[in-house]
Amino acid sequence: MAAATALLIGVGAAPAVSADKPSQPRQCFWNHQVNSFAAQGDRTVNLRVGVKDYYQLELFGPCPDVDWTQKIALISRGGSTICSGLDAEIVTPSAIGPQKCMVRNVRKLSPTEVAALPKGAKP
């Protein structure tokens, strides 16, 4: 009993560790603001949103035909804004019908990252 009490006192005396991390503000966009896209392989799609913003969508797996198609559909799920991978999916046309590709991650690209995109990967 004394050992259990000592353990509880030791835990109570331990300094609290804050789980709060400085978080970055969410960087979201509306799917109707997307002007163009460019695939960077079959697992990454770069979007131009508005006049000067660029976002990169990382897909869960290979997306059939996304790297050569002339058009895609970007569907926002659960709302009108896209802030994370769970908010969006891409649909590409194919010979066997529309192919849905789940988005894993969405991030806004910095001007430096946009400038460093390979030729053909900048929308």
Image (tube, helix red, strand yellow):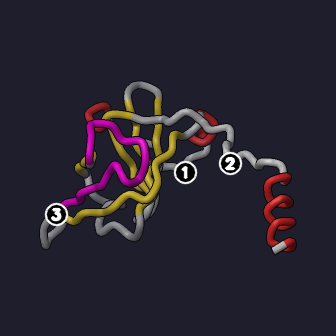
**For the residue marked with disc 1, what is the amino acid?**
Pro
**Toward which corner of the image does residue 14 lie, by quadrant?**
bottom right
For the residues labelled 3 and 1, the Cα–Cα distance comes to 28 Å
**For the residue marked with disc 3, what is the amino acid?**
Pro
Q: Residue at x 55, y 33 (%)?
A: 25
As drawn, the label of residue 98 is: 3
Write the start and end of the magenta stretch as one range: 78-93
**For the residue marked with disc 2, what is the amino acid?**
Ala
Look at the image and say whether residue 28 sits in the magenta stretch.
Answer: no
Between 4 and 86, the one nearer to me in the picture = 4
As drawn, the label of residue 118 is: 1
Q: Residue at x 54, y 40 (%)?
A: 109
Q: Secondary structure at mark 1?
A: loop
Q: Residue at x 59, y 33 (%)?
A: 111
- Left/right of residue 35 with respect to residue 96 in the rendered view: right
- Left/right of residue 92 with respect to residue 103 in the rendered view: left
Residue 90 in the image: state x and y as whole percent: 29, 55
Which residue in the protein does label 2 denote? 19
Task: Give the class, few, some or many, for how many residues have Cα within 10 Å of label 3's Cα (few <14, many ≥20).
Answer: some
User: Do the numbered discs 2 and 3 sit on residues whose CB atoms are within 8 Å?
Assistant: no
Of label 2 and label 1, which has the lower sequence position? Answer: 2
Of label 2 and label 3, which has the lower sequence position? Answer: 2
Q: Is residue 35 visible?
A: no
Q: Nearer the viewer, mark 2 or mark 3?
A: 2
